[in-house]
Structure formats: structure tokens, C-alpha cells
Amino acid sequence: MRPFEYVRPTTVGEATDFLREHGDDALVVAGGTAAVVMMTLGVLRPDYVVDVGFIPELGPELDGSRSGGAGLRLGALTTVRSIERDPAIAGAYGLLADAASQVANVRVRNRATVGGSVCYGEPQTDLPPALIAMGASATIAASTGVRTVPLAGFFEGPYETVLQAGELLTEITVPLPEPGTFGCHAKFTVGSPENKPVANASVLVRTDEAGRCVEARIVMGAVGPVPVVAEAAAALLAGEVPDAKLIAEVAARAADATDPQDDLRGPVWYKRRIAAVLVERALSCALRKAGNGTR
């Protein structure tokens, strides 16, 4: 590992001031589950490592998770494990808790943070598709002020986000789902379950008392340079009481929207087929929860 200078700010202002001055040469670290590995391999070679894990503003009560009528606010230091285990999140934001429970393994989930999961910009990860499906937004601080970006527009390419030099993600906000909203997350990996996904899918549906689909969102990960939002596929569900035939048609349309690449996890045709299967499973799961009235 290349030598670096370790910096430990204690306020958001201190962190953003330092990043403004050294942005291109600095690496922000929270849980470090990905960054430390990349540094060890020599892929990342920062002059400065900025450890934001000691900034109280980024990790408020309940390990950064606060749920209320206005929605869910997740401080950037909120661990994936706390999302998985928080009863308030599981009760009202079931899709997010479901996705969190499928991230890597429990050791990683205990250290990995929601801020790191988002800012890293890796296509093969589970939280961003779920957060996008739930309409989440990112709060970004800089020495010049604060801005909010919908998470659907946060990712620009593999390991590329809208974050500019001197900026720091401080919080993820998730709106409270409307009554009758249910979701599921499905993923497929090669080998151990802790391996990165070949593909994943987050599906959120809202149904009325007759079982008709009022709204649906489908977001897939690991099958494009950024999470893929399958709007045309989701639109097929509007006003329908989905049966097996329609679910399969929606899954096929969603797979058509993907843009995977050949790699060690499989060829393009295989990833599209896996994506279709996962959308079908996640959609069936969400509709089953809607029928049972359980998240």
C-alpha cells in the first residue's frame, strides 16, 4: 500500500474545507470495506485518506436512522446492518431492509455504510437499486452550501457519481411509502452468497383494495453502468391485476432495458436472462406481500 496522510475531521465543515483544498488527492473513507481493499491492491493511491467516521453529524441516533411521518433519514454513517435490523425500517421500508439483508455477509454489513455504498458508485451492489426504487434523495454538503440530488440521477457511470471535488454526502432521505406499497429485492451471485451479484432487482408496487396495481417501480443493478430503471416495463402493470403471464411479460421487458457487459460473471445474454428471472421473482414476491398485507 502506498504511504498516505491520515486525516480525521470531526465536523462536516472541517471535512468539506479539507476536501475543497485537496479533493483530487483525497479519498473519503467511512466503513472502509471497499476502499481499504482497493488501496491494498494499489487500485486507489490517495495522498490523503479522510476518515469521516468520527463526525457526529453523519451518524445521529439509532446508528443514523430516524423514521418519521416525513420519511426516513439515514445519516451517511448508518451501517447496512443497522438498516437490516431496525424494526422501524423493516416495518415501513421493507424493500430497503430486504436489500440490506442481502449485502455480502454479516461481517461486511456491520462495517459498510449507506454513504459508502452510494458514493462508491459500484454497479454490482444492492442498496442503490432499492433506494432508487423508493425514491430516495442524497444530501450533499460543500463549503459553499448544501444541495439535494435524487438518487436516480446520482450515478453517472461505473464508480462515477455527481459528487464534485470538495463535496461530501451527508444523508440519504427516503420518502414514506404510501399505504398499500410493498417491495422485494432479489439477487443472484456465482459461488458464495457474499460474492458480488451477477444481477439484482428491486421491485416496489402499490395496489388498491381490488388488487389492481396503482404504481410500480423496477430497478436493476449489475446489468448496466448505473442502476437500470425499467420504466416501460413497470408501466405495463398500471391498472392491472397481474397474473403469471403479465408478470413474465414485465420481466422480459425489464431485461430488454438492461445494458450488461461480458465479464467473469457471465456473457450478456446470460445476465439478461438472469435479470428477467430476478424481476419475475421480486415482482411476484411484492405482489404476494400486497395480497397478504405484510411488508
Image (tube, rainbow, N blue to C red):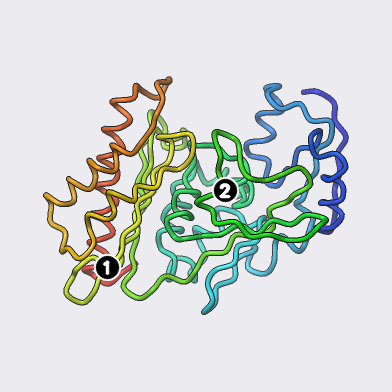
The residue pinned by badge 2 equals: 154
* Quadrant where the C terminus is found in the figure: bottom left
What label sits on residue 214 in the rendered view? Answer: 1
Q: Which residue is pictured at 34% across the width and 47% down the height?
A: 230
Q: Quadrant of residue 13?
A: bottom right
What label sits on residue 127 in the rendered view? Answer: none
Relative to 275, say whether 235 is above or below. below
Report the front residue among 165 and 248: 165
Report the front residue among 152 and 122: 152
**Badge 2 vs badge 1, beta-carbon distance below 8 Å:** no
x, y percentage for residue 141? Answer: 74, 57
Is residue 41 shown left or right of residue 253?
right
Q: Quadrant of residue 189?
A: top left
x, y percentage for residue 161? Answer: 61, 42
Q: Which residue is pictured at 45% across the width and 49% down the height?
A: 129
Circle 2 packing at 10 Å, graded few (<14), some (14-19), many (20+), is many
x, y percentage for residue 20? Answer: 84, 45
Relative to 14, say whether 195 is above or below. above
